[in-house]
Amino acid sequence: MAENREPRGVVEAELDPVEYTLRKRLPHRLPRRPNDIYVNMKTDFKAQLARCQKLLDGGTRGQNACTEIYIHGLGLAINRAINIALQLQAGSFGSLQVAANTSTVELVDELEPETDTREPLTRIRNNSAIHIRVFRVTPK
Amino acid sequence: MENFRKVRSEEAPAGGGAEGDGPGSGPFADLAPDAVNMRVKEGSKIRNLMAFATASMAQPATRAIVFSGCGRATTKTVTCAEILKRRLAGLHQVTRLRYRSVREVWQSLPPGPTPGQTPGESAASLSVLKNVPGLAILLSKDELDPRQPGYQPPNPHPGPSSSPAAPTSKRSLGEPAAGEGSAKRSLPEPGVADEDRTA
């Protein structure tokens, strides 16, 4: 974390508004797919699990069920994403398979010195992300 | 819990007994039985892990390496694997998710100023069983079966600076104006894009 910091000549009161350049920007594949779920630490775990379950099961008669969903987690949410995926698999009696991929995501922090507001400094750091594919298989 | 201290903790696969460290063990015994096993714990320092990992992989005899971690060490495990992939191009990856049961034994600290009594008499002991999610990541110099669940092909990208060309120009409209010059925007790893093709 300290490696990315630039040498400060000016005293920076770091307000440090953390800016995710990728916060509003979902990975380029998302727009065409309603079966992408992004896991975070703010929403209740049970609610996220129920939402994934509903996507896989579909409506009461099984309409609109997705054959596969992608669960994405960034940083601390990696654990939660794994938990959700494994819970889905455990509750499916063997009809669901999971496959996980990992990647690195760049995050940008903006630092505004208190003295001179015209000088936003940007700091770049990397974070780990996981993308878990949960898909239905026909039991052999 | 502030009156307790952790005495020991054991980790085992959930739903199974503790596996001995014998031949044929290891999370990827079926794919790479000779892989160097790096067990990432919560307090592990990434610098130390990477030093050992890069040194091991520098030897041509080492064909594969496994990073495994659970609970609080999960993110660190992924980070180590990603750093190694960046340093060493052309590694094939397989990621496996699993639950681990961790049994922790806590003992109560004696409350009085002079714990003169024999410890163990008044020390209450607490055993906690937790089911925590974890993962194991195999990175291999040799090719692996792409049909394995969790397979990720090596990153075809040659250099560290990826070209933020057409795909990001669309999104720049939604970007806040600040930081547009210095923000290094790049695709979240072409490896993720590859997933599209192999899925």
Image (spheres, rainbow, N blue to C red):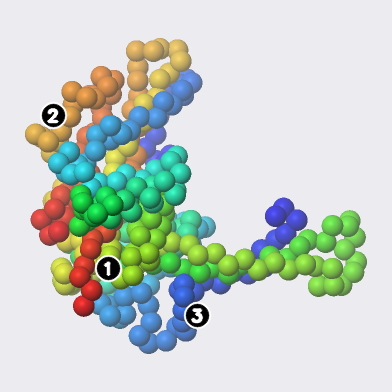
User: Image check: A131 left or right of B153?
Assistant: right
Q: Amino acid at mark 3?
A: Ala
Displayed quadrant of residue A40: top left
Picture disc at residue B182: none
Q: Residue at x 35, y 29 (%)?
A: A19
Q: Is A70 or B63 nearer to us in this picture?
A: A70
Q: Residue at x 27, y 72 (%)?
A: B64
Q: Measured from the top left, where is residue A90 in percent x and y?
A: 38, 66
How many residues crowd mark 1 within 10 Å: few (<14), some (14–19), many (20+)? some
Q: Is B107 or B178 nearer to us in this picture?
A: B107
Q: Measured from the top left, where is residue A31 in percent x and y?
A: 17, 38
Q: Using the numbered discs, state the Cα–Cα distance from disc 3 to disc 2 in whole angstroms.
A: 52 Å
How many residues crowd mark 3 within 10 Å: few (<14), some (14–19), many (20+)? few
Tag 3, which secondary structure?
loop
Q: Amino acid at mark 1?
A: Ser
Task: Please report contact status of discs 3 and 2: CB closer than 8 Å, yes or no.
Answer: no
User: Image check: A47 left or right of B152?
Assistant: right
Q: Using the numbered discs, state the Cα–Cα distance from disc 3 to disc 1 in whole angstroms.
A: 27 Å
Q: Is residue B150 visible?
A: no
Q: Which residue is mark 1?
A: A95
Q: Measured from the top left, where is residue B78 in percent x and y?
A: 35, 56
Displayed quadrant of residue B97: bottom left
Circle nearer the N terminus (3, 2): 3
Q: Measured from the top left, where is residue B196 in percent x and y?
A: 13, 53
Locate the C terminus of chain B by quadrant: bottom left
Q: Amino acid at mark 2?
A: Lys
Displayed quadrant of residue B198: bottom left
Q: Using the numbered discs, state the Cα–Cα distance from disc 2 to disc 1 in whole angstroms.
A: 39 Å
Q: Are marks 3 and 2 on the same chain?
A: yes
Q: Which residue is mark 2?
A: B170
The chain carrying label 1 is A
